[in-house]
Image (cartoon, grey):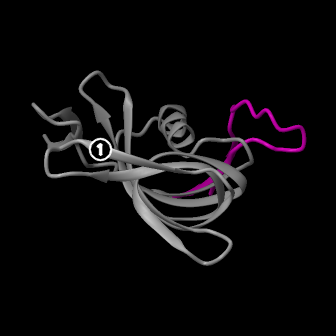
Amino acid sequence: MQMNRGKHFNPFQLANYMEWTRSGDDLFVRLDPGEEIHASIRSLADEIGFDAAAITSGIGRTRENIFGFMNDNHIYHKKTINPSTELVTLQGNLARREDGSPFTHIHFTISTDDGVTHAGHLFEAIIHVVGEIHMRILSKSIMTRCPLENSEFVALKFN
């Protein structure tokens, strides 16, 4: 089993930095206050050196949640919820773009303090208290993210 401390700047005085542990192809990641989910996972892919992964679960508490859906015309519509919320579910995947940069495609469900849930495509969310995420590295998988013509969607292509 391998464990490392990430190298992520965190503006909160009492916050730590992302930590992760690995067992085979399974990664368990802890994100701390101030860390953005997409940026942290992409940074981890570069740090560890993997090209593809399934993001199988995530829980915690987030804020500054920007999420939404794609309409029938392939245009994303975004919604923002700024107060802190419970991160109920998180799942998706990571693949490399054609230029080699990591790309994360994540959906999530959050719950406000009054128990109202919101779900959709995650554009951005900042960890408020903690984020605990499980990922499975797809070490033998070769997949690439490519933009679709006349769409905001970046499609998954298997090589």
In the picture, the quarter occupied by the C terminus is: top left
Q: Nearer the viewer, residue 7 or 25?
A: 7
Residue under numbered circle 1? 76
Q: Is residue 110 above or below residue 121?
A: below
Give the x, y percent position of residue 94: 37, 45
Magenta stretch: dominant SS?
loop
Q: Nearer the viewer, residue 152 or 141?
A: 152
Near mark 1 (Cα within 10 A), the count class, few <14, some 14-19 or many ≥20, is some
The residue lying furthest to the bottom in this view is 115
Q: Nearer the viewer, residue 155 or 113?
A: 113
Badge 1 amino acid: Tyr
Residue 27 drawn in magenta:
no
Q: Is residue 56 something that shows in the picture? A: no
Q: Would you say 157 lies left or right of 112 here? A: left
In the picture, the quarter occupied by the N terminus is: bottom right
Give the x, y percent position of residue 136: 43, 58
What residue is at 47 percent from the left and 57 percent from the top? 135
Q: Quadrant of residue 8?
A: top right
Circle 1 SS class? strand
What residue is at 81 percent from the left and 44 percent from the top? 16
Give the x, y percent position of residue 110: 54, 66
Q: Would you say 44 lies left or right of 49 here? A: right
Q: Is residue 125 something that shows in the picture? A: yes
Range of magenta residues: 1-23
The residue lying furthest to the left in this view is 149
Q: Quadrant of residue 121?
A: bottom left
The residue lying furthest to the right in this view is 14
Q: Is residue 20 above or below residue 98?
A: below
What residue is at 34 percent from the left and 48 percent from the top? 139
